[in-house]
Image: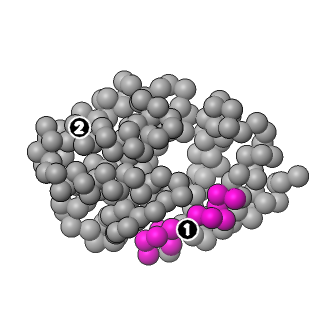
């Protein structure tokens, strides 16, 4: 498994090919999820091989946006399946990576520890100080697609999303849940 080479390959591809109009699903988001996954893997005591698989999944998890916004998880998994054999990943390792990517589809549905970690990493920002900064990027992206038409509509969507979301790993629950609840209460107070 040539993890460093894969990282170079997919990051270059994402930088070059991700649509520039994606304010949220950008290279910054991929890096953020990658970094969050690394921290969670350490805290959750994941083996070295599983950490490399997890980080590979983090790098590929939104690569499907290169092709299309809808079904991007499936497209991301297909890209991983197509590209990873050239870097020495086995069919079993690729299957795990595809499972992690598909688990991030909303509503999240992780079936094992690695899938839980990637799901928590993908939405780590919900319980962080930079929640509103990152949320504004998602608001801009959803507005551009015509999915959201007003700030009030956005706030209602966020309340519904935050009320239905939960973290899976002990680490994320401990480090992110309380702050996420604070954000939820603040958004509720803004709805007209």
The stretch drawn in magenta includes residue 73: no
Q: Main secondary structure of the magenta part?
A: helix
* Label 1 or label 2, whichever comes before in sequence order: 2
Q: Nearer the viewer, residue 72 or 59?
A: 72
Q: Where 149 sits versus 119, above or below?
A: above
Residue at position x 82%, y 60% from top?
Answer: 189
| Magenta segment boundaries in residue numbering | 160-173
Identify whether 33 is placed above or below 47.
above
Q: Is residue 171 magenta?
A: yes
Residue matched to label 1: 166
Q: From the image, tell me which residue sits under label 2.
A: 82
Spot occupied by residue 172 in the image (x, y as percentages of width and height): 47, 68
Q: Secondary structure at mark 1?
A: loop
Label 2, residues with CA under 10 Å away: few <14, some 14-19, many ≥20: few
* Image height of 131 relative to 30, above or below: below
Secondary element at tag 2: helix
User: Where's residue 125, x and y in %?
Assistant: 54, 55
Please give left or right for residue 44 compared with residue 105 in the image. left
Q: Residue at x 53, y 54 (%)?
A: 106
Q: Quadrant of residue 164?
A: bottom right
User: Residue 8 in the image: x percent, y percent?
Assistant: 24, 35
Residue 112 appears in the figure: yes
Q: Nearer the viewer, residue 145 or 127?
A: 145
């Amino acid at each position: 498994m040539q993890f460093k080479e894969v990282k170079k390959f997919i990051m270059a591809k994402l930088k070059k090919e991700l649509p520039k109009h994606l304010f949220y699903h950008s290279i910054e988001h991929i890096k953020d999820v990658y970094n969050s996954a690394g921290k969670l893997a350490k805290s959750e005591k994941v083996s070295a091989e599983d950490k490399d698989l997890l980080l590979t999944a983090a790098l590929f998890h939104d690569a499907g946006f290169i092709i299309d916004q809808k079904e991007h998880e499936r497209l991301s998994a297909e890209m991983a399946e197509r590209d990873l054999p050239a870097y020495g990943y086995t069919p079993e390792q690729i299957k795990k990576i595809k499972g992690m990517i598909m688990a991030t589809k909303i509503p999240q549905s992780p079936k094992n520890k690695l899938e839980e970690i990637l799901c928590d990493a993908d939405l780590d920002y919900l319980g962080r100080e930079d929640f509103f900064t990152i949320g504004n990027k998602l608001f801009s992206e959803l507005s551009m697609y015509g999915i959201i038409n007003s700030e009030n509509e956005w706030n209602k969507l966020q309340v519904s999303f935050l009320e239905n979301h939960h973290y899976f790993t002990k680490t994320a629950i401990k480090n992110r849940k309380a702050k996420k609840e604070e954000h939820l209460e603040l958004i509720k107070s803004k709805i007209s």
